[in-house]
Amino acid sequence: MNSELCFKTAVELTGLIRDHTISVVEVMAAHLAQIERINLKVNALCTLLPEQALEQAAAADERLARGEIPGPLYGLPIAIKDVVETKDIRTTFGSPIYKDFIPERDALVVERLKAAGAIVIGKTNVPEFGAGSHTFNPVFGATRNPYDLGRSCGGSSGGGAVSVACGMTPIADGSDLGGSVRNPPSFNNVVGLRPCPGRIPRYPNPQPWNTLPVLGPMGRTVRDVALMLSAMAGPDARDPLTLNEAPRLFAEPLDFDFKGARIAWSRNLGEFPVEPAVVEALESALPTFSDLGCEVEEAHPDFSGAGEIFQVLRAEGFALGHAEHLEKHRDLLKDTVIWNTEEGLKLRAIDVARAQARRAQLFYRVHEFFQDYDFLLLPVSQVVPFPIETDWVREINGVEMETYIDWMMSCSLITLTEHPAISVPAGFTPEGLPVGLQIVGPFRREIDVLRLAYAFEQATRVGEKRPEIAV
Amino acid sequence: MNSELCFKTAVELTGLIRDHTISVVEVMAAHLAQIERINLKVNALCTLLPEQALEQAAAADERLARGEIPGPLYGLPIAIKDVVETKDIRTTFGSPIYKDFIPERDALVVERLKAAGAIVIGKTNVPEFGAGSHTFNPVFGATRNPYDLGRSCGGSSGGGAVSVACGMTPIADGSDLGGSVRNPPSFNNVVGLRPCPGRIPRYPNPQPWNTLPVLGPMGRTVRDVALMLSAMAGPDARDPLTLNEAPRLFAEPLDFDFKGARIAWSRNLGEFPVEPAVVEALESALPTFSDLGCEVEEAHPDFSGAGEIFQVLRAEGFALGHAEHLEKHRDLLKDTVIWNTEEGLKLRAIDVARAQARRAQLFYRVHEFFQDYDFLLLPVSQVVPFPIETDWVREINGVEMETYIDWMMSCSLITLTEHPAISVPAGFTPEGLPVGLQIVGPFRREIDVLRLAYAFEQATRVGEKRPEIAV
């Protein structure tokens, strides 16, 4: 049956293609069938080019037969997040302002994914301009959580996470400013990595010195995420933050002995409320780390004041990104984007500079913390997937959320530290909703994060449970 | 004679010390004698600790005798720029506000220089808060140009450049935002390198995400500068911009065959006036590159609008750095610092974000330019060393300068590009004033810049001429 092929990992699929055991066309046809069967229910893929995809799959089979050396993602169907520009494929950013926008070129990351052999079959749905961790917009509507169609799939990389969760694509690209490549994996029982700034170069980019937004890979397994990272990462001189290391390491086996690793667990960084169902699911998973030989204790760096720093820096980016939209198309913007942009336009330069200075102190405190601990564990999301009609989470455990992003501090505070962080499936609520664990590793050490997440995944196998509607 | 020892290179001196041919105490005594003989004339070293220096030299000899493996700068006297914090040694920033400030710890770069074996003998003079490329302040007065005591030595790393030029220290640390490690070498016939942001990590640093200011080495030869860089560079996780490459490469021989290298020469980047004496000296030096087998043609990237971008980003940094000084000690600040800080305080966040967005376009244009050329040559300074009484250059070739930093656009515009740039001795005016050539290399390729500067230095030997007062 076709859907079986769709739940093979990217590592398996590329191996089968490379061995000529299956053809790229077979892989593509299976995924297109799965999309036809599932996508109407979840609305994860907002733009789809099936004929073109099959043509490219056939061409890939021909090139392979002629002896082309396949790249690491050869023959895998992929759909690109709709905030990332794709040549000749509509890119809406989830906004009616861009509902008919067709870019003339691919973003660098799309070029790289194509060069690695992936075949772009369409786009994945996003919140309007990627704002807020809940995927809905006036162009395509909402993407639904496949574990409960009445609930949110998170965001902003929601379409991608659901596509992967449902076997409609084996991998998906994401991006993350305040948690966008961590929260949707958590809500949909898949894996997502936020790398360090500069690991995956971005071009073109109007804000290349802004270290909050990054690109990141998603997949159903940690190895698939690492494989995808190996194709996305690596230096490019058009990104001033680019890191020079070659990304080969990420394609290698992730086995590692974590005996004696010092692990800190924090349910809230001392800063935010978390729903009991999230804490319970994660605390049930913690003994796995002891079983792996790690020393686990409750601890966290001092994050006081970090919420305000994040709000200032986020608002500055919104001001640059949306001042013109606000001026010309205010009526076409959602309230939260208007609010965030107006907050940014109120800021003085010194406010931002002072926020960065306070962030420097936080960065130093986190550095000190990582002298004593190898990893920091915490919830990916402060809440379980919420009803899809909710535009943003208004309260947690009776604590009122003042802004549309307050309920995502579990991710956004980590963003400020520039440390790599992964969301890995860790358990389910009694109602069957997925709960992800966030593993934060040492500065620039994505590989450590991937290895620990892999060890955890192998021990728990939580990520192997698929949504019933998709199997 | 002692001063002969003082004009040996750092490479030679460390070799002689390592071979036990001379002792560290001999080296130290020779330099202290040179300082006693010369410093009163030029006022380059503003704080001096001769007894402590001799004690540390004796201790270094003892450790060497006991078998300590000497670091790359072992036994070299060094004085630290007075804007860099030194443990237990007064650090004034050239400001009366800090005239009695004694830091409790060394900046990371000082730790590294000490760990490499250098012995800190005092501090080098700077403009007030390092502002402006002319070294004078109300605490210590002005540093004089050893080639003409009535003229400026440039700045802000002026004390360090003069100390090196006069053989008072073999090497000196500098820092550079708008040209501070390039202009003083140019005015004093020595070598100074502005590396890429992150090459030399900075800690502590209130603005670790600000990519304009960097640290850099100065010396009398390109190899000495490269040797010093090998001790200053290398990763440190406390700097979020840190580059991961090991700095060993910089300590290796710099010989390289530049046959066929594509070199662009620009006298003004199309943007600023340059005094004829500067252009004449540099154009006389250009045939050297043809002799080395390079292809030289006139060309430059499009820098239009870059001056304004630089002013905005510089002012933002001043606002953060000096808002509090302005509030509490306005009467103790020089006019240019007050002006620059007030300019920064007027800025909105969106002004800075838009300047960065325009800078991104410049960065991309320069990237394109470096697809066609391997190096860009231009003047380090738009003027020759000017009378020491001038607070800042008011006009060049009849063109009025609007601000105190307009006459340094030849350096500050290069800062925006993040490309490495070196100032290397290239010639003299008919009056005997030094003129430096600026060599800009590919992004992150300090080694290429050092190698070309070394080839040029070997071919021209301009840098071997020392100021008469010092020999």
Image: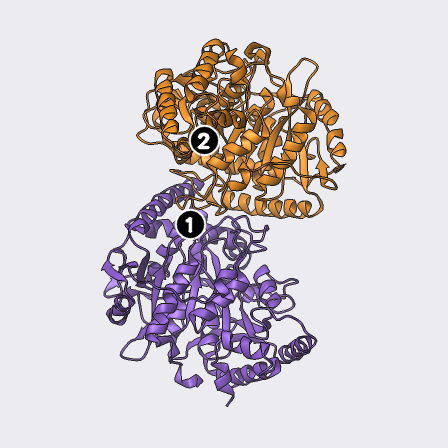
Chain colours: A purple, B orange
Residue drawn at (39%, 68%) of the image: A454
Question: Where does residue A73 sit, x and y in percent of width and height?
Answer: 56, 70
Q: Amino acid at mark 2?
A: Thr
Residue B182 is drawn in which quadrant?
top right
User: Helix, strand or loop at disc 1?
Assistant: helix
Chain at tag 2: B
Q: Determine the secondary structure under disc 2.
A: helix
* Front one among A368 and A322: A368
Residue B119 lies in what quarter of the image?
Answer: top left
Please give the residue where the numbered disc 2 appears in the rendered image: B341
Q: Are marks 2 and 1 in contact (CB under 8 Å)?
A: no
Q: Is residue B99 left or right of residue B133?
A: left
Give coordinates of residue A11: x percent, y percent.
Answer: 50, 74
x and y, in percent, of residue A75 in the image = 59, 75
Q: Is residue B14 above or below residue A248?
A: above
Q: Is A135 drawn above or below residue B41 in the view shown?
A: below
B368 horizontally vs B65: left or right: right
